Structure formats: C-alpha cells, structure tokens
Image (spheres, helix red, strand yellow):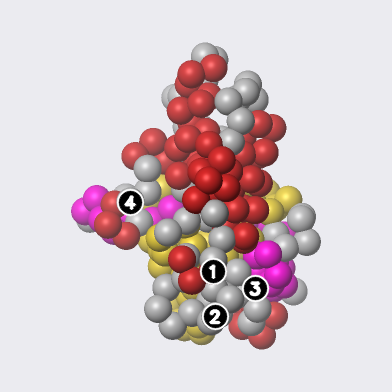
Amino acid sequence: MALTMRAALMGTLELTGRSALRRRLKAIMVALLMAPALLFAPPGAQADGRIGFRVGEVDGTPVARVDVLLKTKTYPGMLRCLDQSVALYIIDRDGAIPSPLRSLKDRPAELQDTKQRTLKASATYVPGKTEKDGVMLFKVEDLKASSFAGTGLMLWDLAPPDSADLNATADKIIWADTVTAFTFVIRADNGEQVLPAVLKSCGVS
C-alpha cells in the first residue's frame, strides 16, 4: 500500500498543462479510496471512514459541519450560504494549508462529485487573526445534497494566483505539488437528509 500510495501521490512528471494536474488529483483520489479508511478517519468515524454531516446554526442560518479528509489529516469543514452562494469552508487548523494557496482570491476551481459531475467554484483564502485560524473558502455552483455520497466530493482543479507565472515546466510542477498537498475528499451519506435546509437558505432546491 505504501508503494501504491507513493506512486499515486507522485503522479506524472509530464506536467505541461491543467489536464495533467487533473490526472494527478484523480490518482490521489483513487489511492485515498483504496487505502485503509481508518488511516484517514478522525475519532468517531464509521468503520468505512465516512463522517456524517452535523446540523448547526450560525447567525441564525443553518449550517452543516463535516470533517474534511486530506491524506492523513482532517480539517474542520462547514457548508453554509454566503452571498446567496453555497460555500464550503475548510478551517486552516495549525496553519497546515500550503503557503502558496494563502494568496488565492476568487480563483477558478473545480470540484468533482460522486456522480463525476464537474462543479465550477471559486477559491479564496481568508486570513484569520493568526496563521493558525484562516479559512479556505470555496463558493460552489450546482452543488447537490447527494454530491457527498458514494466516493464523495473531491478537489479536481485549482488555478494559481493571478500573480503566478507558470510558463516554465518547473513552475507547473511546483504548483501541482502544492495543489496535491491540499487534495481533499468529503464523504458523507446523510447529505440528502441534512443539506436541503442549507441549500434552501441559498435559494437552491
């Protein structure tokens, strides 16, 4: 398993475009799904590594809290309505989100759900009061309550900051490594029971 995981995480060295990055992220997703689930599951998770959404409320609006799986780490996550858009919050616990991602602001991103639908999104890093409490924020289009069942929702593509110059192959490799380090999967089977209230608050049926 260690060799399989390492090969998946290394991906292809032929990183000459965004499609190569997508192939690498897909390889990581496969490795995550094949690996023993408890390696990636926080305490209290089910035996298959799934974590259900937990209902909550922030400023009078419904939210759904969930743990986000990133290789051997978990990040606190939350879904709520923000500016009439469904927003996925990933808390930068312990300042672990790679530094290059912290300069993202309204950058194009893509997520892929359990039905292999590609969901358009925008990614922004919102700094906190310290380096250990920032938030990676994804505003996601066309998110469904069923998007987290089965293989779950995963990061599929992420554009670099406006200021980044990725003309050189080496720069593309570095950016791919950065996104690879942040690849996440969210798997939960109770989305269809919990998420309609959150989606409704954004005017999504």
Reply above or below: 91 against 165: below
Q: Residue at x 39, y 36 (%)?
A: 100
For disc 2, the marked residue is 47
Q: Earlier in the sequence, mark 3 or mark 1?
A: 1
Nearer mark to the viewer, of 4 and 1: 1
Rendered image: mark on residue 199:
3
Quote the CA–CA distance across marks 1 and 2.
Answer: 7 Å
Q: Is residue 184 magenta?
A: no
Q: Are marks 3 and 2 in contact (CB under 8 Å)?
A: no
Give the residue drawn at x 72%, y 63%.
114
Instruction: Give the Cα distance between marks 3 and 2.
Output: 28 Å
- Of the numbered discs 1 and 2, the one sitting upstream in the chain is 1
Q: Amino acid at mark 3?
A: Leu
Along the polypeptide, which appears first: circle 4 or circle 2?
2
Q: Judge the density around disc 4: few (<14), some (14-19), many (≥20) Cα neighbours within 10 Å.
A: some
Q: Measuring 66% from the left and 85% from the top, which residue is drawn there?
A: 193
Is there a contact, CB below 8 Å, between mark 3 and mark 4?
A: no
Give the amino acid at mark 4.
Ala
Q: Which residues are magenta?
A: 130-152
Q: Which residue is mark 4?
A: 96
Q: Position of residue 118 (x, y in %)?
A: 73, 50
The residue where tag 1 is placed is 37
Q: Amino acid at mark 2?
A: Ala
Viewer-nearest of discs 4 and 2: 2
